[in-house]
Amino acid sequence: MPGFPDGCRVFSGCRDWKKGPDMPVHSTVFAQLLKPVDRRAFKQIVERHGGDAYDKSFKSWDHLVALIYAQLAGVSSLRALVPAFNADARAHYHLGTRRLARTTLSDANARRPVAVFADLFAMLSGALDRHTRREGADMIRLIDSTPIPLSKFLDYARSNGRTHGLKMHVVHDPRANRPLRAEVTPANVNDIEIGKKTDIEPGAAYVFDKGYCDYRWWTEIAAQGAFFVTRPKANARFRAIAARPLDPESARGDGFAVIADEEVALASKGDSKLPMPLRRITVERDEAKGRIVLIVNDMRRPAAEIAALYKGRWAIELLFRWIKQHLNIKSFIGEAENAVRLQLFAAMIAFTLLRIAACVHKIDMAALRFAELVGRFLFDRRPIALIDKPPIRPKPGRDFSSLQLQLAAL
């Protein structure tokens, strides 16, 4: 997983500690990580969805803190989470939460509306956008899904022929390493059904694979002034209209070469037509990886640049791999469908908070290393900006106490 991108802006007036009489008194790493969560806005989200209707003593904030802790600390079960979290009771006050009870957490996992965490993730993604946005940068949007395997004995889990469980759909901004939108569905829901719900941004380039083949949706993307880069299905038929000039030197990219660039039109049995110009770009990949064919509606970008956009789709695969390997979504602290969905959104929230913290505190290290350090020092009182440095111990005000002087005189 690559490190965090440059160009992150810093929160104005951000303070990581309060000055005391002898030395700075730092907030815990966990408390600093949670600072971007606007408690007032979160309360409005909770009220909008009735998040505290059934669990009034165990608030949505308590639940959020507990599940984020489970993600960052790598806790894999409900039985392990409760004693681990309660062991640091002194830090609970500054987090605005309290000790956990296993039955209370289990009940909340089964009943609390998933929309509470889903809306919070969307709000934090917007906050991250404000700190990673670069003026003049092209908007690239990757769309894909990843399976979440579950036990075959769970009634709500569905199979798509390969995976039995759920599926997480994500729209991702690779330039800022920022997930924009996430949705969890049964595994047998087609990707295109969720892709159609994506808000199209004029001028953006949407990159997706052949699972999102829907000509009406492609037309909608083009109608809103956006572009798409995709691969056609095996049974899709396009006829060449004209060949576009291709310079062999400029047609090479990192690990590939463009060997054909053509203007095409859809050729089907019903003589269907797409109300937009299309290009078919054939790419030869190095190291005997074979050829791929791309269909795009962008008539201006060089063919090699379009091929590089599709190759960059690997960034969302890296996101899925990172979340699965380094956050806790391989094992679940509850088997109920609601509990699994809550934990998946808690993982996305944890990832977004890590990204915001990296920008705010100008963390210059690999994302994996930063996540490991945060998980290790969650309840340590040190600034996140110095998380990889040893803590500074205060110097004593006197070399010897009065009692030591008396002993020395005897």
Image (cartoon, rainbow, N blue to C red):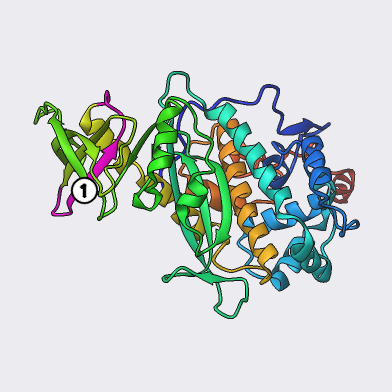
Question: Where does the image place residue 93, in percent across and percent down from the top left?
Answer: 85, 48
- At label 1, the amino acid type is Ile
Q: Of all residues shown, which one is farthest toward the left?
A: 248
Task: Out of 238 and 173, give the one closest to the viewer.
Answer: 238
Query: How many marks can you see?
Result: 1
Question: Residue 100 in the image: x percent, y percent?
Answer: 82, 63
The quarter of the displayed image where residue 99 is located = bottom right
Q: Which residues are magenta?
A: 286-301
Note whether 75 is above or below 357 in the view shown: below
* Residue 305 percent coordinates (x, y): 26, 31
The stretch drawn in magenta includes residue 292: yes
> Can you see residue 71?
yes
Residue 174 can be seen in this image: no
The residue furthest top is 136
Going 79% across and 65% down the picture, which residue do you hit? 105
Find residue 327 and report its horizontal and vertical position in percent: 56, 57
Tell me which residue sits at (58%, 56%) in the image: 184
The residue furthest front is: 270
Question: As drawn, is 21 to the left or to the right of 164?
Answer: right
Reply yes or no: does residue 291 show up in magenta: yes
Q: Is residue 321 above or below residue 47?
A: below
Q: Residue at x 58, y 61 (%)?
A: 328
Image vertical order of residue 1 relative to residue 260, above or below: below
Residue at label 1? 292
Q: Residue at 51% x, 26% y: name it.
A: 133
Of residues 324 and 92, the one drawn nearer to the viewer in this rendering: 324
**Along the line of sight, which residue is nearer the eye, 334 or 66?**
334
